[in-house]
Amino acid sequence: MRVVTGDGVELAVDVWPGSDVPFLLVHGLASNARLWDGVASELAGRGHAVAAVDQRGHGRSSKPDTGYDFPTVVADLLAVIEALGWERPVAVGQSWGGNVVVELAVAHPDAVRAIATVDGGVREMRARIPDWDDCARLLAPPPLEGVPFVEIDAAVRKRHPDWPVTGIEGTLANFEVRDDGTVAPWLTRERHMQILRHLWELPVSERLPLLQVPALFILAQGDDVHARPDVQVPVGDVRWLRGDHDLHAQHPHEVAELLAGFAA
């Protein structure tokens, strides 16, 4: 379905019907809704209503030059919830999407019954990289426009040999495939940097204590969980899963199981 926001942006939303607690799934920076396919199918199989949204500038949604600040992207999610006719879904965000659902719950606690994040929403970026110029240099997106799709496809499959097909296909959906067989990221570099700047400026440590709804934080664990000193969550329940940053793509069954248990 397509949802039109207050400023006229059209958002693409994939919907799985169900009668149990609804879930709104929100992707991360430079990602897209398709990375939630595996989790959404698992949740729908358990009877939950599910919707995954392509945020503005991403995937199949409109791509305006402005509106990438947190109040605006939060308003986008409110428009999606209203269009779905849902009453207080569980909002789940991955990476930057985790920060978006935290902001949604802080600003509009009556709009959601709970939130969950998947390796996102808890890190104070400015504390780790105090200078914006350093952040922009370190975290700018790689120049992938014009790379042949076959090379991107091969690289994704080589990098993630243990991922299910939903995760692979979802990652490849981050790109527009042009008629000449080359790709371009759906999110342009300029818009990517706008979002990154807003994320860098966000005082995460001040926002998390303001949460008034139940919260679950699913975080990626490397070889040593204690090697993540940047993760200090003052509220909610924290669960660790061994895997990549895109845990929802790599381990959809495990992530869905945690979310369904949390909703129950």
Image (cartoon, rainbow, N blue to C red):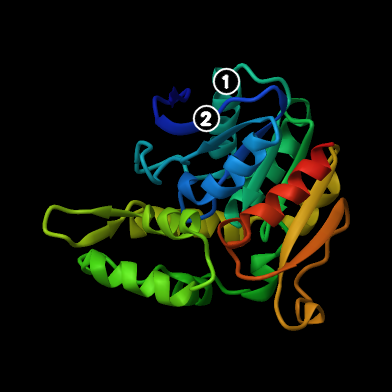
* Separation of marks 1 and 2 at Cα, in angstroms: 9 Å
Amino acid of disc 1: Leu
| Residue visible at 70% across and 64% down in the picture | 123
User: Which mark lies nearer to you, 1 or 2?
Assistant: 2
Marks 1 and 2 in Cβ contact (< 8 Å): yes
Mark 2 residue element = strand
Extreme residue toward the top, this view: 85
Numbered label attached to residue 246: none
| Residue visible at 39% across and 52% down in the picture | 191
> Position of 51 compared to 228: left or right?
left
User: In the rendered image of this protein, does residue 25 appear above or below residue 120?
Assistant: above
| Residue visible at 52% across and 60% down in the picture | 164
* Other-residue count near label 2 (Cα within 10 Å), few / some / many at <14 / 14–19 / ≥20: some
Mark 1 residue element = helix
Q: Which residue is label 1 attached to?
A: 84
Q: Which residue is label 2 attached to?
A: 15
Residue 97's x, y, as percent? 59, 49
Residue 119's x, y, as percent? 67, 61
User: In the rendered image of this protein, does residue 113 appear above or below residue 25?
Assistant: above
Hey, which quadrant is residue 120 in on the image?
Answer: bottom right
> Position of 232 compared to 131: left or right?
right
